[in-house]
Image: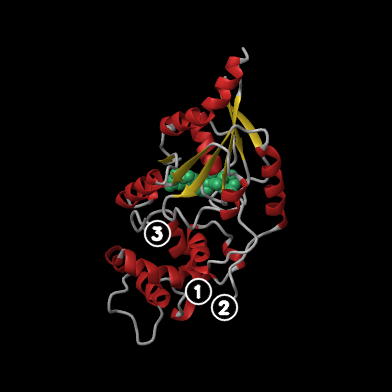
Amino acid sequence: MQPIQWYPGHMAKTRRMLEDQLKRVDAVVELCDARAPLASRNPVLGRMLSGKPRVLVLNKSDLADPAATREWLARFQREGVSVCAFDAMRGQGRDVIRLLEEAVAPAVERMARRGAVKTARAMIVGIPNVGKSSFVNRCLRRNAAQVADRPGVTRAEKWLRLTPTLEMMDSPGMLWPKLDDQEAARMLCWLGSLPDDIQDIEGLAESLLRRLMELAPRSTEERYHITGGGEEGESLLEAACRGRGWLLSGGRLDTERAARLTLDEFRSGKLGRITLERA
Ligand SMILES: Nc1nc2c(ncn2[C@@H]2O[C@H](COP(=O)(O)OP(=O)(O)OP(=O)(O)O)[C@@H](O)[C@H]2O)c(=O)[nH]1
Ligand SMILES: [Mg+2]
C-alpha cells in the first residue's frame, strides 16, 4: 500500500506565514479533534510554538465519547496544559475565551504598566478540517470565516476582532512533511483531515469498519447489517454494501459508494459518539 502523505505547496507556505505571524501574537489557540487528541496534533507546531502562551481546544467534542474526553482533559491538565473541550456547532466559547484571556494577561498587564491599552492577538492553528474557522465564527457569533466539510478550505490568514481588546487570526490547516506514524495518519484520513481523493477510498473504509467493529460493535453491526449475514471471504465493506443495499445494476456491489457513505456516516457521528484514541 502507498504511504499516506499530504504536504502540498500551500502547507509549506502556511508554515512560513505562521512562523512570521508568531512574532506578532500574544497567544496561540491550538485546535485538535477530540476523537483523536494525539493523532490530530501537529508535532511541528509543538516545536514552533514553544514559549508562547497556549490554549489547547479539543474541538468536535459533540462527536467524541464524553467519558473519553473527560479522561483526555484530565491527562492534559495533569501535564500542565491549559485545555478545554469545545463544540463549534453549539458551544458558547466562554471557557475558551476565559482561558485565552488568562493566556494573554501577562502581555496586557505589561502594556498597562506602561499606561497603554493593548489589543491582544491570538492565532488559531491546527491540522486541516478540525474546525478552526467554525471555532472563530462561533466565538465571533457571526459567519466571518468560510467553513466546509473538506480539508484545505481556508487558504490565507485572516484577522478578526473578537472584543475591543482581543483579535483572533484564523489560519489554513497545516500538516507536517512526513507522516511517520501511518496508523495515526489513517485516523486523520478517517476524520477527514486529508483529502479522500489522494488515497484508496475502499481500503480506507474497510480499515475504518474494522476499527469500528472493535470500538462500537453493536452500532456498527446494526447500521450496516453485517452480523453473520456476510458471504464467505467477503470484506466488511462488501458485507456493509450488501447489508445496506448499495448495489449497481445487475446486483453488483457498489463498494465505492459504500466507502464514501461509510466515511461520511462516521465523520458526522451517525454511529454515535466514538473516540479513536484513549488517554
Ligand atoms: N459536529 C461538529 N462539526 C464541526 C465542529 N467544528 C467544525 N465542524 C465541521 O467540520 C467541518 C470543517 O470545519 P472548518 O471550520 O471548515 O474546519 P477548518 O479547521 O477551518 O478547516 P481548513 O480551513 O480546511 O483547515 C465543517 O463541516 C464544520 O461544520 C464541531 O465542533 N462539531
Ligand atoms: Mg478553515
Q: Which residue is mark 1?
A: 203
34 shown above or below 145: below
* Residue pictured at 52% horizontal, 62% vertical: 189
Residue receiving disc 3: 277
In x, y percent, where is residue 59?
45, 45
- Measured as percent of width and height from the top left, residue 2 is found at 60, 75
The residues bearing labels 2 and 3 have C-alpha atoms spaced at a distance of 23 Å
Judged by depth in the image, the label closer to the viewer, 2 or 1, is 2
* Label 2 with label 1: CB-CB less than 8 Å: yes
Q: Nearer the viewer, residue 138 or 185?
A: 185
Q: Which mark is residue 85?
A: none
Q: Do the CB atoms of the residues marked 2 and 3 lie less than 8 Å apart?
A: no
- Say which label, 1 or 3, has the lower sequence index: 1
Eye-nearest disc, 2 or 3: 3
Marks 1/3: CA–CA distance = 20 Å
Q: Is residue 87 above or below residue 102?
A: below
Give the image location of residue 153, x and y in percent. 62, 48
Given the image, on which type of amino acid does mark 1 rest?
Gly
Residue 187 placement, left or right of 228: right
**Tag 2 secondary structure:** loop
Figure check: 8 above or below 162: below
Crowding at label 3, few (<14), some or many (≥20) Cα neighbours within 10 Å?
A: some
Can you identify the residue that label 2 sits on? Answer: 1
Q: Amino acid at mark 2?
A: Met
Q: Residue at x 61, y 22 (%)?
A: 119
Q: What residue occupies the far top of the structure in this picture?
A: 115
